């Protein structure tokens, strides 16, 4: 096994924050980042290899994340921390530096399930669910995608029809993060009033789940199918504020925002590992880092990681100032996840054979990022969203 830390012999910019992006954070934002980084290093990183190898997510970490204030972190009231969007982003960055599955858990809980209730739910929904979700006592999932309706969620087949004042929901959802560990599912269904969202306690008769097995990516995260077979819900299970596809898509903006920060963390971890490894390992009688080809790669990784950090901060500031447009979030999700995947693939190669094992993080991150680039809108969906914004011509259909 190679030594795992590199000598710190250089003065000058911090290799991991070369443009001193973190100096632009407020004191609170920096403190939150440091607290999450410390917590993740102590409580999460030591277990992540095992979780990943076994393909499990340990539900018992949820209350700890809740105590740190990470669940529904940038939502206000109802037991949520109400931090800035940038603080939330920095937290996502630090979690994803350990593993995308951890950030995914926080994204789905806070940005999808809790945000849907916070933004579109009734006061009763908010009071009933949000405080317990913020504490990590209740886990949520978000069911939009179906086996035959992924990039095009508007073609969903899951339906909800009226029976007296109740609703009866039938259908299935596919690829749902947290599905089989969730206590409640926010399920989107077609009704005669268009697409509506429902809060479904997972103990309700007719609701079942099945694990998606043998994933080669995001293994430290639960992914499930949801089945709704004549699930009968009271009238007040419907989220009153969300009508049409705009409801779920507004939630996706929130989760995509967390991802564009999280990708910076995964990329930074891969670059850090490649920098350390090539400094410490020698071939041909010299450290790998002394070869020009290696230095070129390191420079490319440095630029990619730090440019992505700047993109994240700028989009975060726009969001905090109330002025972020969904296509700016598409820009960030597309640019930063693509950059992170390139960084991970290059870093993986720089570690040689060691890079294909779980002894190092690069390949785990690389495999995770294949999911991250797919969920919350594939590259193509974000390209088309940007293309539509630039040309005013929709090329989705
Ligand atoms: P389109 O006609 O464009 O829009 C329908 C309505 O929605 C509005 N809208 C948005 N609103 C808020 N934010 C956005 N980003 C929005 N994009 C569109 C739009 O204004 C319109 O509103 P209204 O009031 O006029 O009706 O709809 P379309 O059918 O053409 O589809 C557009 C498209 C392709 C961009 C959209 O469907 C899309 O984003 N597809 C990708 C699907 C996706 O991202 N799924 C993610 C599922 S959740 C998930 O992956 C969780 S992983 C989490 C984890 O583990 O971390
Ligand atoms: P498809 O839509 O079938 O796309 C396949 C390919 O075709 C892609 O490359 C796509 O970009 C391309 N394509 C499609 N349409 C076009 C077009 N018009 N032009 C050009 N190219 C096109 N969903 C949820 O609702 N909740 C969750 O919690 C959730 N968690 C997930 C967790 C994981 C690990 C994964 C992998 C997925 C998760 N998803 C979740 C689903 C995810 O959002 C979808 O996989 C994603 O939206 C893409 O849908 P799809 O897989 O059906 O691919």
Image: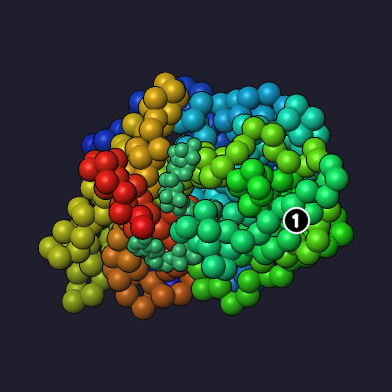
Quarter placement of the N terminus:
bottom left
Residue at label 1?
A: 169
Mark 1 residue's CB less than 8 Å from ligand 2: no
Q: From the top left corner, tell me how far across and down residue 331 is, in percent.
A: 32, 44
Name the outermost residue toward the left.
292
Q: Quadrant of residue 285?
A: bottom left
Residue 348 seen from this side: yes
Q: From the top left corner, tell me how far across and down residue 363 is, in percent.
A: 42, 68
Q: From the top left corner, tell me how far across and down residue 295 is, in percent.
A: 18, 59
Q: From the top left corner, tell me how far across and down residue 172 is, in percent.
A: 67, 64
Residue under the point 71% across and 70% down: 210
Q: Quadrant of residue 175?
A: bottom right
Q: Is residue 270 above or below residue 219?
A: above
Q: Would residue 211 be found to the left or right of residue 291 on screen?
A: right
Residue under the point 43% across and 28% down: 319
Residue under the point 63% across and 25% down: 76
């Amino acid at each position: 096994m190679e030594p795992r830390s590199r000598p710190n012999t250089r003065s000058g910019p911090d290799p991991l924050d070369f443009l001193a992006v973190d100096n632009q954070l407020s004191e609170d934002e920096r403190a939150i980042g440091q607290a999450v980084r410390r917590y993740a290093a102590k409580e999460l990183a030591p277990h992540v290899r095992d979780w990943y190898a076994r393909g499990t997510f340990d539900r018992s970490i949820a209350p700890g994340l809740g105590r740190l204030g990470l669940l529904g972190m940038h939502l206000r009231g109802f037991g949520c921390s109400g931090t800035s969007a940038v603080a939330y982003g920095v937290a996502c960055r630090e979690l994803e530096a350990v593993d995308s599955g951890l950030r995914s858990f926080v994204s789905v809980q806070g940005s999808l399930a809790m945000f849907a209730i916070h933004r579109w739910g009734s006061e009763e929904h908010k009071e009933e669910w949000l405080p317990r979700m913020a504490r990590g006592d209740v886990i949520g999932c978000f069911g939009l995608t179906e086996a035959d309706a992924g990039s095009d969620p508007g073609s969903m087949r899951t339906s909800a029809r009226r029976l007296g004042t109740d609703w009866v929901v039938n259908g299935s959802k596919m690829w749902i993060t947290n599905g089989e560990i969730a206590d409640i599912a926010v399920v989107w269904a077609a009704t005669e009033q268009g697409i509506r969202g429902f809060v479904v306690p997972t103990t309700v008769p007719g609701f079942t789940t099945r694990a998606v097995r043998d994933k080669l990516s995001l293994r430290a995260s639960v992914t499930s199918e949801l089945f709704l077979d004549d699930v009968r819900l009271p009238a007040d299970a419907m989220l009153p504020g969300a009508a049409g596809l705009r409801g779920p898509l507004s939630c996706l903006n929130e989760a995509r925002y967390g991802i564009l920060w999280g990708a910076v963390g995964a990329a930074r971890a891969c670059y850090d590992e490649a920098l350390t490894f090539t400094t410490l390992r020698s071939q041909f009688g010299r450290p790998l880092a002394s070869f020009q080809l290696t230095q070129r790669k390191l420079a490319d990784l440095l630029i990619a990681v730090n440019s992505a950090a700047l993109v994240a901060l700028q989009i975060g500031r726009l969001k905090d100032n109330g002025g972020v447009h969904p296509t700016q979030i598409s820009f960030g999700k597309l640019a930063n996840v693509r950059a992170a995947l390139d960084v991970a693939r290059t870093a993986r190669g720089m570690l040689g054979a060691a890079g294909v094992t779980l002894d190092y993080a690069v390949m785990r991150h690389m495999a995770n990022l294949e999911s991250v680039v797919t969920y919350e809108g594939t590259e193509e969906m974000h390209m088309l969203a940007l293309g539509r914004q630039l040309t005013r011509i929709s090329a989705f259909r």
